[in-house]
Every structure is written in C-alpha cells, then in structure tokens.
Amino acid sequence: MHAEQLAVPDAFVMTPRQHADDRGVFLEWYKAEAFQRVTGHRMPLAQANCSVSRRGTLRGIHFAAVPPGQAKYVTCTAGAVLDVVVDLRVGSPTFGRSDTVVLDDQDRRAVFLAEGLGHAFLALSEAATVVYLCSTPYNPAAEHGIHPLDLELAIPWPADLAPTLSAKDAAAPTLTEALAAGLLPSHEDCLVGYRH
C-alpha cells in the first residue's frame, strides 16, 4: 500500500497493490497495521457504509462534532467519484482548504480523512458505489454539514455536471455561517484526539 499526504493535513490517498490474472483482480483495500504505519493514525472500525449514487449526485460536505469526531476511509468499488476533503478545523494553518481525488474501480484508491475534516463526493459515472469505514457510529445529533457549493471553498466541481443535492445538503450553512454558529471543530481538540 502506498500513501500520499493530501494538501489537507491528516488526509491521505492510499493506492493499493493490485494482483491481476485471468480470473480478475485481488487487492487489500485496508490493512490496519500498514495503514497506521504509513499515516500515523489509528482507524478503529465502528461502522461500514455503502452509498450508491446516480451521475451528478453530490453528497456532503459532512463532518461530525469533535470530540469524538468521525474518521473515514473511503473507496469507490464501482464507477467513479470526485472525492473531496475540506479542512474545517478552526485554527488549522490550512483551515478552509480542500483537496480532490478521483476514486474509481480501476485504480481502486482510497482516501483517509481524520476527525474534524469535512467529506463530500460527486458521482462522475452513470452509477457509483462508494463504501467507507467509520471510526465511530453515526450519531445524528453530532452530524453537521457545510454547503458543498459554497463559493468561499472554491471546490473545483466539474463544470459539465449539474449537481443533485439532498434537501439537507442544500440547506447546509456556508463555511462562514458554520464558523459564526460555533459548529466547526477546533484544530487543537482534533490534535488531542489524534494522540489518543
């Protein structure tokens, strides 16, 4: 497994070694020991999610209150998505910065994002299946969102796709509004959590 740090600290793109033969392909898309060695983060498994989306579906930007937050390890098992990580940690040197990675069923890369980072993805193929491991279970009371089309974030969504948002994501606050409302995690709280 090869890991590359994204522009947002505590987020990585993981490229697995694929073993192909005339029967198909085998790969280890997550291996705890190797993951911790290359990222310096632990990824306890509390929940696994699967999302199937039509082309143009935009999900996110989602994040969980810290503590405890929710780390995610995300891959696309069918089709392709533009995966986005946003630094929402108040006080972080890269606060408000984002990075994008295409996840698909060819390269079979995965993205890890630590607690306090926001996550979104846009389905690029006619259908896309995204699966992700979560470090904590879903807690509706601790879940928050940022509007994914917030101009302040300047996320480079493809211009040829008109995104389809859920009602919840369409009503999400901008980064500035979420900051003013005290919804965003602090960088310091996240760093404390990473050490435990």
Image (cartoon, grey):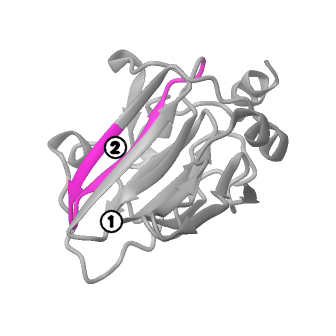
Residue 132: image location, x then y, percent = 45, 40
In the rendered view, tell whether residue 136 sits above or below residue 174. Answer: above
Q: Quadrant of the C terminus?
A: top right
User: Which residue is more in the foreground, 121 or 20?
Assistant: 20
Give, as a three-letter code, the residue at label 2. Answer: Pro
Q: How crowded is mark 2: few (under 14 residues within 10 Å), some or many (20 or more)?
A: some
User: Which residue is more in the foreground, 118 or 123?
Assistant: 123
Region rendered in magenta: 50-67
Residue 111: image location, x then y, percent = 57, 52
Give, as a three-letter code, the residue at label 1. Answer: Gly
Name the residue: 54% across, 52% down. 86
Query: Is 60 colored magenta in this rendering?
Result: yes
Q: Mark 2 points at which residue?
A: 173
Q: How far apart are marks 1 and 2 (CA)?
A: 30 Å
Q: In which quarter of the image is the N terminus?
A: bottom right
Residue 17: image location, x then y, percent = 67, 61
| Residue 62 in view here | yes
Q: Name the residue under label 1.
A: 79
Q: Residues within 10 Å of mark 1 (few under 14, many from 20)?
A: many
Name the residue: 50% across, 34% down. 133
Name the residue: 61% across, 47% down. 28
Q: What element does badge 2 sit on?
A: loop
Q: Which residue lies furthest to the bottom in this view?
A: 160
Residue 115: image location, x then y, percent = 61, 33
Assess whether mark 2 and mark 1 are in contact (beta carbons under 8 angstroms): no
| Residue 149 in view here | no
In the rendered view, tell whether residue 158 sits above or below residue 94. Answer: below
User: Total label count?
Assistant: 2
User: Which residue is more in the foreground, 119 or 38?
Assistant: 38
